Amino acid sequence: MTQAPQPNQEPNILGKFASVVGLLGIALFFAGWIYRWSYFYFFQLEVTNLDFPAQSFLFVPLQIFLGDGWAIFRTVFAFLLAVIAIQLTLWLIWIITEAFVNTFNQFLSTRVIPATQRRRSWIAKQLNSLATFSSAQLRSVEFLRSLVNEIVIVSWVLIFIFWLARWQGIADARRDAGQNSTLPVVALITPEEKFALGRKLDDVFADPSLEKYRIIGDRGLFDDLRGKEDTDISNPNQPRVWRILLERGGWIYLFQALPPNAKANERPLVLAIQQGEKGHTVIRSPEVSNTK
């Protein structure tokens, strides 16, 4: 008589690896989306309108978790906090569950069972069946317990990833909007009839004509920029430096860097320039030129 083949007890390493990679990809995508959302929201831009490729969100989070020594330390610290928060939450759920089960069993044994033993109607039989559903049987529903544990773990991990990515996005945006920006200085040259703002190359003191232009909205925003479209670092206390934030979807986003004494809640004003048929010239530079 041949013996039945024993089931393979070896763990499915490939399946577990695929599950880990899938979860890691979801976490990285979530972190990348939150980082970009907070970064561009600082500049009053909506990330959903910038048309980034989906795969790019998987590489952005690397600087959140592994950008430098401080980022690695912050990631390890957040990981330890997440583990502690998960353990405390599961412990509280266990205490609440045990208290509920004990209270429920006590109620059944002292109220429901004696009442059903005196009455033998159909409702009494159903209540008696419910009473015999003991706490041991409630605890045997391992699927629900596992589901609750996974919900708790995933929730805390997403919470910590959200705050790490959001904090890093705002910090990087605040840095790039100030005097220590990593974004390039820009010189944008475009035809006169295409752009209402800007200085003439042959006469920087002359304002372009606004005869054929119309406006809707806050006229003060336009007036505050008019005459200040060029980079000027002659006053170290109030330098005026224009930088390029992004080129995406046929638009060029420029902004004037914040001064050194900018307030914590201050945001830079961003210009969105649409690329046209006549073309334009964009000059990028890591530093402001020394030419006067």
Image (spheres, grey):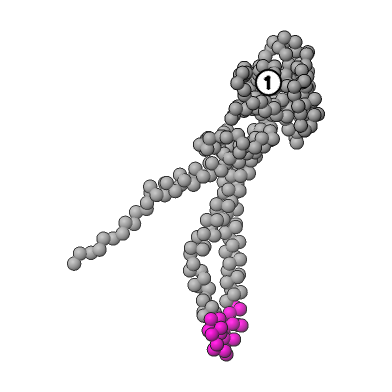
- Residue type beneath disc 1: Lys
Residue projecting furthest to the bottom: 118
Residue 181 visible in rendering: no
Q: Which residue is mark 1?
A: 194
The location of residue 47, given as percent across then percent down, is 62, 37
**Which quadrant holds the C terminus?**
top right
Q: Name the residue: 62% across, 27% down.
A: 251
Q: Secondary structure at mark 1?
A: helix
Is residue 119 part of the magenta span, yes or no? yes
Q: Image check: 139 left or right of 196?
A: left
Q: Image check: 73 left or right of 223?
A: left
The location of residue 72, given as percent across then percent down, is 57, 38
The location of residue 122, given as percent across then percent down, is 54, 85
Q: Name the residue: 73% across, 29% down.
A: 269
Is residue 87 part of the magenta span, yes or no? no
Q: Main secondary structure of the magenta part?
A: helix
Q: Image check: 46 left or right of 54?
A: right
Residue range corresponding to the magenta coloring: 106-128
